[in-house]
Amino acid sequence: MTRTGSYNLRRDTLRMHHLDLILPITVIVIAEFLLFLGNMKAAIAVHAMNIMMLVFLEMLFTDRTYPAIMLLSLFRILNVTMPVFFKLTLYSYATIYLPMFLPIYMIMRDGTFDRQAAGITLRGFWAYLPLAISVGFALGFGEYCVLKPEILVPEVNLKSILILSAVMILLVGLMEEFIFRSLLQNIIMERIGSTPGLLASSMVFGLMHSGYHLPMELVYVFFAGIVFGVMFWSTKSLPIIAITHGVTNISLFLVVPAFPYYLPYFIGIPLLIHVILGGVIRKIRTCESSPP
């Protein structure tokens, strides 16, 4: 057997049993469990080992699975080791999330991930936007009941609301949803099936919130991950799911603690608009498909 044939056999064996997927995700689970227990140094070391293992696997068996999973460990290392440059926590998000644009750009530049499959499209954006806002505010209320965080801005004014919204949607929402939904969920669904893939990617998403050290937060974010995953699966739109995620954080860190009495309106009115829009769109499509 030639060397190329041997490499192909090993790659096929790994993929057949999904070992190339299970192994690095298991390492991530171990690292996040260590972080949950408060052992940050050990968690960082395990994530670093995971990156090195994935680099080695990518060198041997070029596969888009490896760089996608590598982003998870890279993101965690940046998250816990980035120096604090700002007193205001909100501005610190930029130092964590902006560096992630470079590896993501490199992954997309190689063309190994289809832009349409990754949800990089505005198709159906306006039809689903009200639903994204409604679901985001509802999920934020649920997470607030678990975390009870303080308001993330020093003063509640138009400027701080706009800054918070931009950070949560364009950085946190866009970045995390690209990693967990556009890449990870698509890959796992492709490998092990739609429902198992949705649950597995949501589980990883929940575990990546182990830094809060709250079991209920892991459970709730796992549930939120399923909601995000179903919405992405249905809409195939990264902008929509990024807005949903961003609005969840806006609700969590601003709206629920500062304006709790307005929350039913923030949830109900967009949901009503979505229902009305859906009815209008269905009516138009019926008229277009009906014979003259």
Image (cartoon, rainbow, N blue to C red):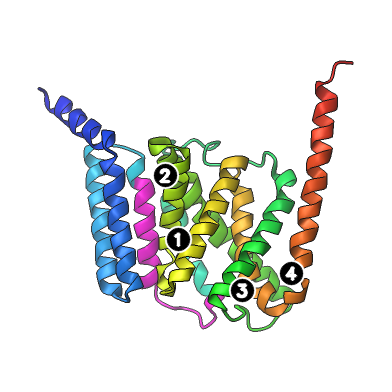
Q: Which label lies toward us, 2 or 3?
A: 3
Q: Which residue is mark 3?
A: 253
Question: Do residues under tags 3 and 4 come within 8 Å of each other at their CB atoms?
Answer: no
Looking at the image, which residue sits at the far right?
292
- As for residue 73 lying within the magenta part, the answer is yes
Spatial CA distance of label 2 from label 1 is 24 Å
Q: Which residue is mark 4?
A: 263
Q: Which residue is mark 2?
A: 107
Quarter of the figure with the N terminus: top left
Spatial CA distance of label 1 from label 3 is 18 Å
Check disc 4 and give the amino acid type.
Leu
Magenta span: 67-90
Residue 148 placement (x, y as % from top left): 57, 78
Count of marks overlaid on the render:
4
**Mark 1 or mark 3, which has the lower sequence index?**
1
Q: Is residue 175 visible in the rendered structure shown here?
A: no
Spatial CA distance of label 4 from label 1 is 25 Å
Q: Is residue 185 left or right of residue 250?
A: left
**Mark 3 or mark 4, which has the lower sequence index?**
3
Q: Which residue is mark 1?
A: 206
Check disc 2 and give the amino acid type.
Ile
Q: Which label lies toward us, 1 or 3?
A: 1
Picture residue at 44% right of the left edge, 73% below the top? 214
**Mark 2 or mark 1, which has the lower sequence index?**
2
Q: Is residue 110 above or below residue 163?
A: above
The secondary structure type at the circle numbered 2 is helix
